[in-house]
Image: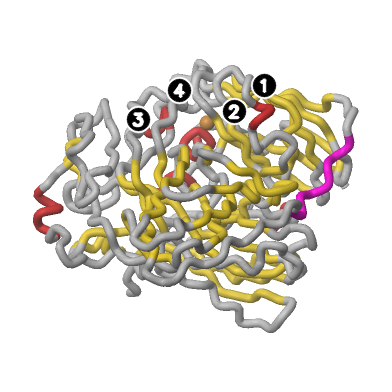
Amino acid sequence: MKKLKDAPPPIPGGEPADAVRRRLVFAGIATAGLAGCGGGSSGTHMAAESPPAPNVTAPTGSGWPSLPMLQNTSGPGQFSAALTASPTTANFLPGIATQILAYNGTTPGPMIDAYEGDAVRIRFTNRLDQDTTVHWHGLPVPASEDGNPMNPVAPGTSRDYAYTLPIGSAGTYWYHPHPHETTPEQVYRGLAGIFIVRSRTDPLATLPERLVVITDLRLDATGQIAANTATDLANGREGDQVLVNGAHQPVDTIAPGATERWRVLDATNGRYLRLVLDGGPMWVVALDGCSLPGPMAVSELLLAPGQRAEVVVRAPVTSGQKLVLRTIAYNRGAMVPIAPPVKLLEITTTQAAALAPITLPASLPAPPPLPMNLATAQTVVLSDMGMGMGASGTGRFTINGKSFDPTRDDITMKAGVPEEWIVRNAGMMDHPLHIHGTSFQLVASTRANIASDPRLNAFMDTVNLISGEQIRIRLRIDTPGRRMFHCHILEHEAQGMMGVINIAA
Ligand SMILES: [Cu+2]
């Protein structure tokens, strides 16, 4: 059994494992200044209705964890690989084997690194004890290949996922399970990976890249992953430690003045990342799988669950200075304490001579805008205040008043024909709406500050709506079949906040 590759090793001067385990963090107690190992900045989560369960946090400060790559067994123009989901163990805590679910033995799963135009064929094997699927989040793959809950892969069986990555699809995506009702648990137990599609004409191709795959983790007193509570089901699960590439607050070094492209993925079930970078400037160059029209300097950037961003960052020009990426408090309207600020990673400049600054290109290959003056084809209303009283909460989380039914078509549209939709969040908390198989353009919002938001007129596959917000999006789905659209807080999706778009040929 392969151990988790990215597990943080003990560090010189760090706390021994026993001390970490003894220093328990009790759920239900606000723990600012209590939870940390080293940095003292680990958050925790209030599990109000369950008996107080002691949680433990992983040591911090490991070296930079690089992700394993999914091996391509074909030549240029093709990407062929084998991917297996199976139970295994990871060493988040030194000396403790935590049961996880993993793709090819690691969490996050292996990075998929392919090119536009590649014919992809991935032989997927399910070694879990329940149905699963692989969903290629954001990629415009045929409906039959998109890992919909209606197309489960049974335990002990395999299937091929085969599709071609269209020219123009270069960007940062991810893959994760999408089975009916069990997606949240499969993801929080470890099944998620980043998927990069490259262009041969990428204007930023010369920049060094860093992957920042964010997951979060909640371990019980024995070091095992804690199950979802009723609070998690209602609000979306937030683990009490935030991991980067599977490690807790990893550190690295960088040449002074270096410019890097970071691909950031929020692969958590329900944690919002309000990202700030201390020590250097940050430009957004892409949201989800799509370039912006040009680099946009930002002081902070919000990622909802499922979203990605590509940012360009620049290191300080003198040695011994730090770039620190943090997520700061964000009120998403949930009935849980607002997650405390958390340091995600820390990178220190070396003694090397400062590198000359790189001038970023003024324009980037954003998708062409969709036609204006489209009639409103759909109004989509998200609600978290339905009257359902079932034990699973089914009936509370709805789209247009309905809970998910895999046999029902909620929306019909025609392949290749652009539409404009109104989407409204009539709920009390934020909901990130994800539409499969396409990227859509956000063209308007009732939010006051939308004009200065990099999202306005940009393309994305997941858009966050705050309570009461109404937006307009334009979208076109080019291939026929039945597609999912849903809230990407996975607990909401699993409890009904999902629908089917049937795209006619
Ligand atoms: Cu939601």
Q: Which residue is mark 4?
A: 333
Q: Which residue is mark 2?
A: 465
Local SS, label 2: strand
Q: Nearer the viewer, mark 2 or mark 3?
A: 2
Local SS, label 3: helix
Q: Quadrant of residue 319?
A: bottom left
Local SS, label 1: strand
Coloration of the structure image: secondary structure
Q: Earlier in the sequence, mark 3 or mark 4?
A: 3
- Nearer the observer, 139 or 407: 139
Tell me if residue 220 is in the magenta stretch. no
**Is residue 165 visible from the viewing direction of this image?**
yes
**Total tally of numbered discs in the picture:** 4
**Is residue 186 visible from the viewing direction of this image?**
no
Please name the amino acid that badge 4 sits on.
Gly
Q: Earlier in the sequence, mark 2 or mark 1?
A: 2
- Name the residue rendered at 69%, 38% in the picture: 500
In the figure, 391 relative to 118: above or below? above
Is label 4 in contact with label 1 (beta carbons under 8 Å)? Answer: no
Q: Earlier in the sequence, mark 4 or mark 1?
A: 4
Residue range of the region highlighted in magenta in the rendering:
364-371
Is label 2 in contact with label 1 (beta carbons under 8 Å)? Answer: yes
